[in-house]
Image (tube, rainbow, N blue to C red):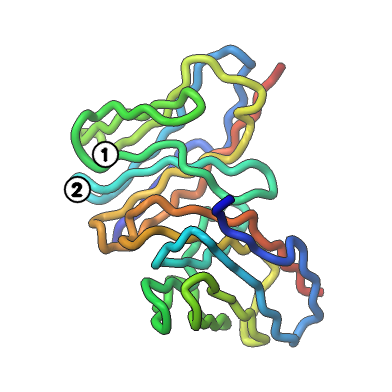
Amino acid sequence: AQSVTQPDIHITVSEGASLELRCNYSYGATPYLFWYVQSPGQGLQLLLKYFSGDTLVQGIKGFEAEFKRSQSSFNLRKPSVHWSDAAEYFCAVGKTSYDKVIFGPGTSLSVIP
Amino acid sequence: DGGITQSPKYLFRKEGQNVTLSCEQNLNHDAMYWYRQDPGQGLRLIYYSQIVNDFQKGDIAEGYSVSREKKESFPLTVTSAQKNPTAFYLCASSPGQRTDTQYFGPGTRLTVL
């Protein structure tokens, strides 16, 4: 069965430090990949998505993610974290355009001033 | 402004009562979804609808029911058969295919006393 893992349940970084959130999936082919962000008590907002082409994807709010087929990974990065980035981050994967999207368990990000 | 509205934001019910959560969208999207969110478990799909008057069960449909009589509305009923209904419920919509970007509402937190 298709699955999505986010190995880090919670991460704490200092403001201005770099950030990398990990995401791995079990499906072998190139899936549809997403990163969403959720502020406390709110809905989710799309940060970026990858369907094909350039494996480095730019998103909103200064985030980027890199698809690595050999590692079945789609890690999210940001060079300099802002206090407003504190939130829950979800990786999501869809096998084909007609399959459901499966969400990972999420990584909670705290930012120290 | 286009978007998705969910009401109410907080809902309290006594055990054994049915309760209906509202979800409305004015994005002219064909597809709509209901997710349940519990701490540490990410989002789990309850029901989805690709078109008016049609809907499909997701992974955790037991104890829930939906209707899709209008394109813009997709209400969720949490019935007394749902054994553990206390959770955060998120509604989403997308243009059509299931791997399109999903747009989320602000959520409804249901507490069953």
Give the quarter of the image for residue A84: top right
Task: Locate the C terminus of chain A and report the quarter of the image it occupies.
Answer: top right
Q: Tag 2, which secondary structure? A: loop
Give the quarter of the image for residue A74: top left
Q: Tag 1, which secondary structure? A: loop
Picture residue at 49% right of the left edge, 63% below the top: B44
Q: Is residue A84 above or below residue B109?
A: above
Q: What residue is shown with label 1? A: A72
Is there a contact, CB below 8 Å, between mark 2 and mark 1?
yes
Report the disc number at residue A28. 2
Q: Percent from the top left, x then y, of residue A76?
A: 42, 30
**Of the image marks 2 and 1, the number of the one nearer the N terminus:** 2
Q: Outermost residue toward the top?
A: A16
User: Marks 2/1: CA distance?
Assistant: 7 Å
The amino acid on which the numbered mark 2 sits, given as a three-letter code, is Gly
Q: Is residue B103 above or below residue B78?
A: above
Label total for image: 2
Tell which subunit mark 1 falls on. A
Picture residue at 64% right of the left edge, 72% below the top: B22
Relative to A1, B8 lies left or right = right
Relative to A9, B10 lies left or right = right
Picture residue at 37% right of the left edge, 57% below the top: A101
* Same-chain status of marks 2 and 1: yes
The amino acid on which the numbered mark 1 sits, given as a three-letter code, is Ser
Q: Percent from the top left, x then y, of residue A109?
A: 60, 32
Relative to A40, A100 lies left or right = left
Relative to A8, A94 lies left or right = left
Q: As rendered, which of A16 and B8 lies closer to the eye?
A: B8
Q: Percent from the top left, x then y, of residue B45?
A: 47, 66
Task: Locate the N terminus of chain A and report the quarter of the image it occupies.
Answer: bottom left
